[in-house]
Image (spheres, helix red, strand yellow):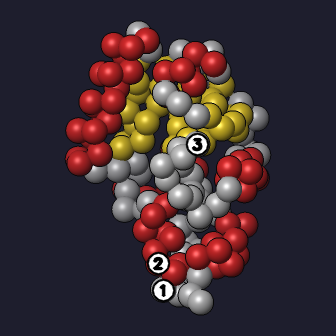
Amino acid sequence: MRALFTGSFDPVTNGHLDLIQRMASLVDSLVVAILVNAEKHPAFTNEERIAMLSDACRAWPNVEIAAFQGLVVDAARHFNATVIVRGIRHSAELEREMQMARMNQALSGIETLLLPASPQWAFVSSSLIKEVTRYGGDVSPFVPEAVVEQLRARCGPR
């Protein structure tokens, strides 16, 4: 089975990595794809996010890092994924992800697997990590070591 896991990963967090590790153990191969969205203004470039993810995921040989633009189902087809996998942190996300899963299935026939976040990471989000960094907080317990300095340089107090 080949799975697709998408997100902004701006930046990658330990919560993302926990999901990636768990997903990688369930499937033959996993494509982790960065969403390229012109409407959003990420703190890191696509290339920087790919580099951070590639570095953080090098322990899992069945994980491939990529980027995509457009519909998730088109990315699933492009990467020959047989299933889309999404992480769920809380009940508000569940409703949105269920809606997206149903739409993706209706558009393509591709099923979505919803994987609950591990409790220790359920409160962690990339946007919250950037906000804490902006105000000088220590985010080192929540992101890979290599990401901490990049965050401080890009998002830290001025």
Residue 119, placed above or below residue 28: below
Task: Please name which of the two marks, 3 or 2, marks the residue nearer to the observer.
Answer: 3
The amino acid beneath tag 3 is Val
Q: Are marks 1 and 2 in contact (CB under 8 Å)?
A: yes
Task: Please name which of the two marks, 3 or 1, marks the residue nearer to the observer.
Answer: 3
Residue that protrudes farthest toward the front in the picture: 38
Q: Are marks 3 and 1 in contact (CB under 8 Å)?
A: no
The amino acid beneath tag 1 is Tyr
The residue labelled by disc 1 is 135
Residue 79, placed above or below residue 148: above
Is residue 119 visible to us here?
A: yes
Q: Are marks 3 and 2 in contact (CB under 8 Å)?
A: no
Rounded to the nearest angstrom, the CA distance separating label 3 from label 2 is 24 Å
- Whether residue 116 sits left or right of residue 43 in the image: it is left
Residue drawn at point x = 37 percent, y = 33 percent: 114
Q: Return the x and y of residue 82 as percentages of the image width and height.
A: 53, 15
Q: Return the x and y of residue 97 as percentages of the image width and height.
A: 32, 36
Residue that protrudes farthest toward the top in the picture: 109
- Whether residue 5 sits left or right of residue 104 in the image: it is right
Res 132 label: 2
Residue drawn at point x = 59 percent, y = 82 percent: 156
Q: Return the x and y of residue 102 as percentages of the image width and height.
A: 30, 21
Quadrant for the C terminus in the image: bottom right
Quick one: label 3 or label 2, which is nearer the N terminus?
Answer: 3
Label 2 neighbour load within 10 Å: few <14, some 14-19, many 20+: some
The residue labelled by disc 3 is 36
Secondary structure of the residue carrying tag 1 is loop
